[in-house]
Image (cartoon, rainbow, N blue to C red):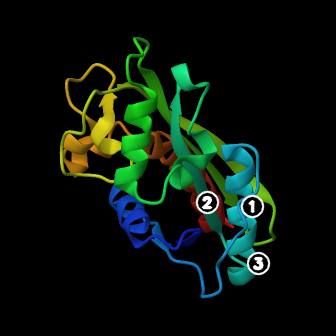
Amino acid sequence: MKIVLASSNEHKVKEINEISLGEGIEFILPPSGFDPVENGKTFEENSLIKAREAWKLSKTWTLADDSGLCIDALGGKPGIYSARYAETPQKRIERVLKEMDGVENRKAHFACCMTLINPEGKVEMAYTGICEGSIGFEPRGNNGFGYDPIFLVENSEKTMAELSDSEKNHVSHRFRALRQILKYVQTINTDLKRA
């Protein structure tokens, strides 16, 4: 079964295909012209906007995700603006560390909301995965992307960027959301085979 992943990020498609290996599902990029306007106020709204945009182009099973870093002491920021918090990944990290300078409560979490749309264009399922952790004092590790080098995974001494791909793919917010979506898709797959 092929599912269009509402993203133009090849790294994300690769990561999601690695997580879902052996499930009989292949995630593919949307057709050209995918350029959603993410003007939602929540991860859920932005995920739905992306899913609908990709579905309009493909008219098949479509999955979208919207994710970001939420820091307690910053009132949930950067949140839905995680990818737009500064011009480059490095500057985004620098901005967060500056804003967290001298802050004792470093609790944070990554959130990932996934929305699955069926070939008729209706929402089949939406689920939000959470990965708890805290903000470190300096970047560590070379794996991953985004805020991974400053995000210390809960119950671990490592940042997300110090985890191997397989370690990350078992604790990440994206993994937790995708696991629920995959469970649901497997029930659909079984029903379709019976029909």
Quarter of the image for residue 180 reads: top right
Disc with the residue nearer the chain's start (3 vs 1): 1
**Residue 115, label in figure:** none
Is 138 placed left or right of 22 in the picture? left
Considering every residue shown, the one lying at the far top of the view is: 104
Is 61 placed left or right of 107 in the picture? right
- Estimate the spatial distance between the alpha carbons at disc 1 and disc 2, rounded to whole Å: 9 Å
Labels 1 and 2 touching (C-beta < 8 A):
yes
| Residue at point 28%, 19% (across, down) | 155
Question: Residue 141: x percent and y percent?
Answer: 18, 44
| Residue at point 60%, 88% (across, down) | 32
**Residue 64, label in figure:** 2
**Which residue is denoted by mark 1 in the rendering?**
49
Local SS, label 3: helix
**Which residue is denoted by mark 3 in the rendering?**
56
Q: Is 138 drawn above or below residue 62 in the view shown?
A: above
Q: Nearer the viewer, residue 27 or 133?
A: 133
Q: Nearer the viewer, residue 87 or 71?
A: 87
Q: Amino acid at mark 2?
A: Ala
Local SS, label 1: helix
Local SS, label 2: strand
Q: Nearer the viewer, residue 146 or 124?
A: 146
Quarter of the picture containing the C terminus is bottom right
Q: Residues within 10 Å of mark 2 (few under 14, many from 20)?
A: many
Q: Amino acid at mark 1?
A: Ile
Question: Residue 85: x percent and y percent?
Answer: 53, 49
Q: Amino acid at mark 3?
A: Lys
Q: Is 39 drawn above or below residue 129 in the view shown?
A: below
| Residue at point 41%, 19% (across, down) | 106
